[in-house]
Image (cartoon, grey):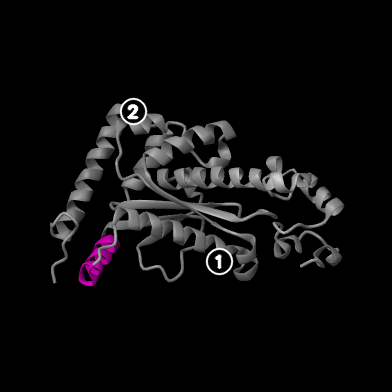
Amino acid sequence: METYNRFGHDASEDAEQIDKNNNKTKKRLKTTLTVDSRVVQLFTFDLNQKRIVIGTDEAGRGCGAGGVFASAVCFNHRSKELIEKLVDLNDSKKLSAKKREELYDIIKENSVNSTVCIEVDEIERINILNASLKAMRLAIEDVINQLYPLPDEKDKSIARNMLARSELMILIDGNKRIWDFDYSQRYVVKGDSRSASIAAASILAKVSRDRYMLKLDEEFPEYNWKENAGYLTKEHMALIDKYGLCKYHRPSYLQKHFAKQEQLSLF
């Protein structure tokens, strides 16, 4: 059975065209910017996948309070101007808060993207690893639906799913794959320093979560979440000792850090 894409062409021809377009883009990047530029290396990593890339990363997995966020990003339209705007693109942890905010707006305006939060109650129910992977999966699925809108007719829906699976490559930061996810995927250790789409996803997730923690700080200012973002700094642990836990803390995670089980009695 022949598979046709959304433009009415044979899907096999699409794969060849994607490869040609990727090669042209790589040549254009190398001639317009310095070859050793880090941002060129990040985009070249994605182009070398020879498919349409969606990168994903999470923020807040190692926190003692607040939800875990994941973002997914697809740069489906690249240009010299966009690359130059993203010249500082990097792992979000290596950027200042001000720089992350600047890049956040550029990424949001120039990519297909999605951000998802899994809250504390679900983290406690399914554990933080599963919650992180679930957030990634939901964000990726939303991006896929934006790239390949679901048709009303069932027979066209099957063709749409086949096309998406044939064209996409999912890049996941870390060393875990997303379970029971029927798309080509690759985990990339330290991917936020190697892949443009993962680096961008790390920035969206980090900025989104930091904004979320600022709102939680307004409700519980005694934990100083506007500064520690829910991570277990010495100050945060001392404040937990002083005030106990609130509804946004993660008891299962905190058990590893506190021997006094009475602090968990509220839960």
Which of 28/8 is in front?
8
Q: Residue at x 35, y 44 (%)?
A: 75
Q: Residue at x 42, y 33 (%)?
A: 86
Using the image, tell me which numbered label, if any, was put on residue 87: none
How many C-alpha atoms fall within 10 Å of the one at disc 1: few (<14), some, or many (≥20)? some
Depth check, mark 2 against mark 1: the one in front is 1
User: Relative to residue 158, is residue 35 depicted above or below?
Assistant: above
Whether residue 142 sits left or right of residue 262 in the image: it is left
The reply to whether discs 2 and 1 touch (Cβ–Cβ < 8 Å) is no
Determine which residue is flagged by label 1.
130
- Could you say whether the residue bearing mark 2 is in a helix, strand or loop? loop
**Picture coordinates of residue 30 (x, y %)?**
30, 32
- Could you say whether the residue bearing mark 1 is in a helix, strand or loop? helix
Q: Residue at x 21, y 71 (%)?
A: 155
Determine which residue is flagged by label 2.
33
**Residue 50 painted magenta:** no
How many C-alpha atoms fall within 10 Å of the one at disc 2: few (<14), some, or many (≥20)? some
Q: Amino acid at mark 2?
A: Leu
Q: Amino acid at mark 1?
A: Asn
User: Relative to residue 145, is residue 113 depicted above or below?
Assistant: above
- Figure quadrant of residue 11: bottom left
Query: Over which residues does the magenta segment extend?
Result: 153-166
The quadrant in which the N terminus is found is bottom left
